[in-house]
Image (spheres, rainbow, N blue to C red):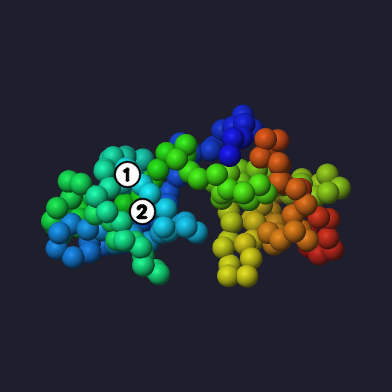
Amino acid sequence: MQHSDSHNRSLPDYVVIGVVTKPHGVRGALKIRPLTDEPTRFKDLTELYLAIDGHRTLFEVDSARVSSDYVVLKLKGIDHRNQAEHWRQYDIEIPREWVRELPEGQFYYYELMGLKGFLSNGTYLGVLQDIISNPGQDVYVFLNPEDDKEVLVPAVPEWIQNIDIEQGTITVSDGPGLLE
């Protein structure tokens, strides 16, 4: 998905797609908690970064096995359980250019963070600071820095009228009770 990044200087260069939870077995494999709706994407990666506190190390992927709750990765150069232990709690990152294109009208969380929220009548809600992921629906958390007020908006079509990545805005229905 090609978007102008000019509206939002906070788009990351790298995107987190998982977290190393612990070693798996004795041959240096890593157990990963995927942070993607598509964990099978790990099977398509030939390289990835292990990152912590902004420091990244590039690894070639030897193999990836996907289960219902986790992914087991074998990376070249990590050959023993003790080596794998070092990478516990590291993020699995890929460059933003490697992120798969989504269907029109769908967005990655990182694309939405920092967008400015407005009611359909023009009232400023604030900047999208967080997305609470619930089983039924996501909830967008806007924070207005002027009054430090949080506004929670269900991320459903009845409330979200428009998302314009290029303009850096989210338009929200002006429904009763939203700002109370």
Please name the residue that numbered disc 1 is placed on: 46
Q: Position of residue 19 (x, y in %)?
A: 36, 56
Q: Are marks 1 and 2 in contact (CB under 8 Å)?
A: no
**In the figure, residue 9 lies in which quadrant?**
top right
Query: Is residue 50 visible in the rendered structure shown here?
Result: yes
Amino acid under disc 1? Thr
Q: Is residue 23 toward the left or the right of residue 176 in the image?
A: left
Q: Is residue 141 toward the left or the right of residue 125 in the image?
A: left
Q: CA distance from mark 1 to mark 2?
A: 8 Å
Please name the residue that numbered disc 2 is placed on: 43
The single residue placed furthest to the top in the displayed view is: 6
**In the figure, residue 29 lies in which quadrant?**
bottom left
Q: Is residue 36 toward the left or the right of residue 64 in the image?
A: right
The residue under the point 61% across, 35% down is 3
User: Image quadrant for the C terminus?
Assistant: bottom right
Q: Is residue 65 toward the left or the right of residue 137 in the image?
A: left
Amino acid under disc 2? Lys
Mark 2 secondary-structure assignment: helix
Decide which of 125, 86 is in the foreground and name it.
Answer: 86
User: Image quadrant for the N terminus?
Assistant: top right
The residue under the point 39% across, 68% down is 69
The residue under the point 78% across, 52% down is 161
Q: Position of residue 149 (x, y in %)?
A: 69, 54
Q: Position of residue 34 (x, y in %)?
A: 41, 59
